[in-house]
Every structure is written in structure tokens, then in C-alpha cells.
Amino acid sequence: MQNIALVTVLFTPLATAILMFSAWGRKKLQVSIGAISTLLQLIAAITLFQKDNAIGIEIVNVGSWPTGFGIMLVADRMSTIYLLLSSFMSVVAFWYAVSFIKSKTSISIFFPVYFFLVFGLTGTFLAGDIFNLYVWFEVMLVSSFVLFTIGADKQQLEGSLKYVAINVLSSTLFLIGIGLLYGLTGHLNMAMIGKALPLVTDQLLVNTTAVFFFISFGIKAAIFPLFFWLPASYHTAPIGFTALIVALLTKVGIYSMTRFFTVIYPLEDTFLQIIMLVLAALTMVIGVLGAAAQVDFRKILSFHIVSQIGYMLMGLAIFTPLAIAGSLFFVIHNVLVKTNLFFVAGTVNRNFGSYKLKELGGVLRQSPWLALFFAISAFALTGIPPLTGFWGKYLLAWSGFQEGSTLVVTVTTISLLVSLLTLFSMTKIWNEVFWKPSPNGSQNEKFDLIKLIKLQPGMMLSIIAITLVVLVISFSPNSVIEWSMKASNFLVDNQSYIESVLNHIN
């Protein structure tokens, strides 16, 4: 089979989820199955990435149905970057959760649903038509709702209901958009829609469908003013799961926007481009102000997710190859760094008993290694050179000032100012959690690195693995920038995607 890597990367999580049910209640067996599965998917993703980086795109028509009736899987350079990233995060989030979740019943539920979620994520990045993209979204929604409610306390249920309610609205708008697009073009395949849409006479209706999709994906990405569900729900879930959704679920919204507003609705010189730029600036500012006002470790990090989404949206909205490459680089950076910060927050909670800043303190003295891991990720998040955030912001700022219009330059300047506020909120965590003396005065127990690894091997090794990847990219960013540029060039020239898919069909 020529496309074995693509098929493996998609169906391994599904097979694993089914096997997990058969091993219900046997934690060691479930852990073994999960470990093999995540590694197998990561190897398949690396293979697929290397192949697509060389040839540009790979397509599988599942079941060999006539196009428009079956499921088409399309892996281009952007897809494979997301797949590689999600597969790596799946490995580290799995091991973190194994070490973090102690309840036998909770972890038995967690394992199969976790892999259904990974299955949905993977399908999203490979969807070649819009209805299948909708289906993958629903797989993710159902899986993530179950994961949100593990533990079933009042706070989790409230957060889960908010999450589901707003995502049902998002799905409804998405479904309406699909219906309108199918009515206008007679197609569900993205490439076929992208070819047919410029020929539609009623361009007002075309623009209306674009708005439906923008709002739907905007909710999932948590952009201003559609972000309120995120800080209300993310901090309620188990941290092992929070890390995964932090890492990837909001990025699904950015991924979908990038796909739609390059292939189907090229964004250049449209009214949506201006709206996106304005919303990008507001998302950055409101998100970071929300973070600065919080007094809970996880809530500060949750609001930062909102703020950072603004940078990614800004790159898409500027809509030059360099800007989209900057947005893609920023996604890679943010997924790694933000997940690691949540991992550190969970480890602090496990060893020091709280997420509330006023109840914490003295962590630097008791656990300098944990403080070091936090500092690296926090500096990277704020964009301190030469860490990953600096390169992402550098690419975005360069593209913004190069584009040169008043609005773009203004938004770019705002993005640089927001970095200062991000630094302030990170300093707040540092001072309260790591620097100040412990409020209860007990600083006798020391947690050196060896002790932390013995106590929580999965949690600490996950943190170390992500930190090493962040440092490698920080000091050697050229390869990632080059991958991002290749993917970006392919996206901006939407005819490349359309012709590649249509040539496969013909």
C-alpha cells in the first residue's frame, strides 16, 4: 500500500481506542497499548511528514468511491506539520496523564476516550471535504465533553456545559455554511468548491457563507469576542487532558480558518481581511489583560491561550507567504510552550497542593529544576531571544512592517506591546509561585530532579522532552522556518492545492 503512513497515522488511534475498551480496568495493559500506539502514530507522522515535505501532497480516496461521495484524505505540507505536532503532543500528554490521574475508574475512562479524541484531531487535519471536516469536529466534541467531566464535580460539569453549548452553536453555524456552499456549487470537496466558487454569480451569498464559517471557526479558536467559554472551562478539567486540549483543540480552529481562507475563500483584499486584523488585535489585548487580572495559575495560562491566538490570526489576516509562515511557526511554538506551562502548573499542584497564587510560594527553593522548566517556557512565551516565541514574533512583525499598510502596521505594533503585558503576567506567576517564601512556612522538603522523576516519572519526562524540543527549535530555528515557508507558499497559491487534488481525481 503506497499510503501506508497516512492510513497508519489516522487509524492507529481508532484501533487503540477499541482495544482500550477490551482492556477496561487493567491499567498496565492499557498503558502498554497506549504507549505502543502513540509511538506508532508518531513514527507514521514523521514518515508522512518527510514524504510530503519532498513531494508536497498525498491523497487517499477511501473506498475508491466516486469523488464527492466518499471520504478523501489530503495531506499537504500544512497538514503534515500539524500531524507531526499533534502526534508528538499525544505521546507526552499520554504519559503525563498516566502519571497524573490516580483514580482507577477515571483512568479507565480516560484511555479510550483520549484516543477517540486523537482520532478526531487526526481526521480534522486530513479532511479533504467540508462535510467530513464537520464529522471530525463532532468526534472531537463528544470525546472532549467526556474528558471534561472526568471526576464529575460541580465546577467541571459547569465548565463542560458551557463548552458544549458554545460548540453546539459553532457546529450549527458550520452545518448551515455547508448547506449553503453545497447549494451554490454542488460540491463538498474543498478543491472542487475552491474552483467553482469564483464562478458563482451571487457573490453576496458567497460572502455570507464565509461569515458563517468564520464565526464557527472563530468560536473554536476562541478569538474575541467568542472566547469566553475557554477560560470558563479549561481550568476545570484534569490537567493531563487540559494540556492536550490546550495544545491542539483551539489550534483546530486556526487550522480550519487557514485552510478555508486560502483554498476556498482567498482572503486577500476582502472585507473579512480587515475584520480579522481588527479582531486579532482585540484578541491579543483582551486575552492578555484577562491573564493579568487572574490569581489562579491555570486561569492565567488559559487567558494567555486567547491572547496568543490573536498572533496566529494576525498572521493569517496579513495574508502574505511570510505572515502565514509566521503564523504556522507561532502555532508550533505555542503548542509546545503552552502545554509545558500547563504541565508545570499540574506538577506544582501535585507537589505543593494548589493552583492559587496566594497559597503557593517558595517553589524555587524547594524545586529549582521545576522553576527552571517554567522559566524557559515562560521566557519563550513572552518572546525573549533566542527562544521560540522570539522567532515567531519576529516573523510576524517582519511580515507586518513589510506589508506596510496603516492598519497592518498598527496591529503589528500592538502585538509587540502585548508581549510586554505577557511578560508582566508571567512575572506575576514567577513572583507568587516560585520567588516569594512559602505562605505556610514549610520549606523543608526538597524536590531535586531525580526525586521528581521518581515521584512522577511520566509528568517530569514529558516536561523535559518538551523543554528539549523548545530549546532545539530556539537555537536552530532554520528548519522549522523553512518548513513553514514551504507550507505557506503552497497555501497562498491556492491553485497548487486545487490542481493537485483535481489531478488526482481525474
Image (cartoon, rainbow, N blue to C red):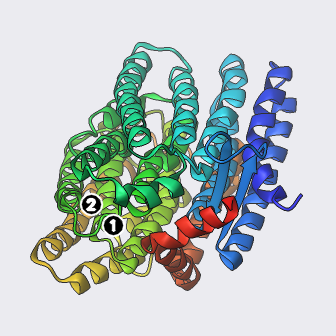
Classed neighbour count for the residue bearing mark 2: other residues with Cα under 10 Å, few (<14), some (14–19), many (≥20): many
Classed neighbour count for the residue bearing mark 1: other residues with Cα under 10 Å, few (<14), some (14–19), many (≥20): many
Q: Assign the N terminus to one quadrant of the image.
A: bottom right
Kindly identify the residue that appears in the image at 50 percent across and 45 percent down: 187
| Contact, mark 1 vs mark 2 (Cβ under 8 Å) | yes
Q: Can residue 371 be seen in this snapshot?
A: no
Up-down relation of residue 317 to residue 128 (above or below): below
Kindly identify the residue that appears in the image at 74 percent across and 43 percent down: 65
Q: Secondary structure at mark 2?
A: helix
| Quadrant in which residue 266 is drawn | bottom left
Kindly identify the residue that appears in the image at 10 percent across and 76 percent down: 406
Disc number placed over residue 422 in the picture, else none: 2
In the image, residue 337 lies at what x, y percent? 48, 60
In the image, residue 467 lies at what x, y percent? 57, 64
Task: Give the total number of marks visible in the rendering.
Answer: 2
In the image, residue 334 lies at what x, y percent? 45, 60
Front position in the image: 431 or 323: 323
Horizontal relation, residue 130 to residue 228: left or right: right
Q: How much space separates mark 1 and mark 2, taking CA atoms?
A: 6 Å
Kindly identify the residue that appears in the image at 50 percent across and 38 percent down: 242
Horizontal relation, residue 133 to residue 449: left or right: left
Q: Secondary structure at mark 1?
A: helix
Instruction: Please tell me which of labels 1 and 2 falls first in the chain.
Output: 1
What amino acid is at disc 1? Thr
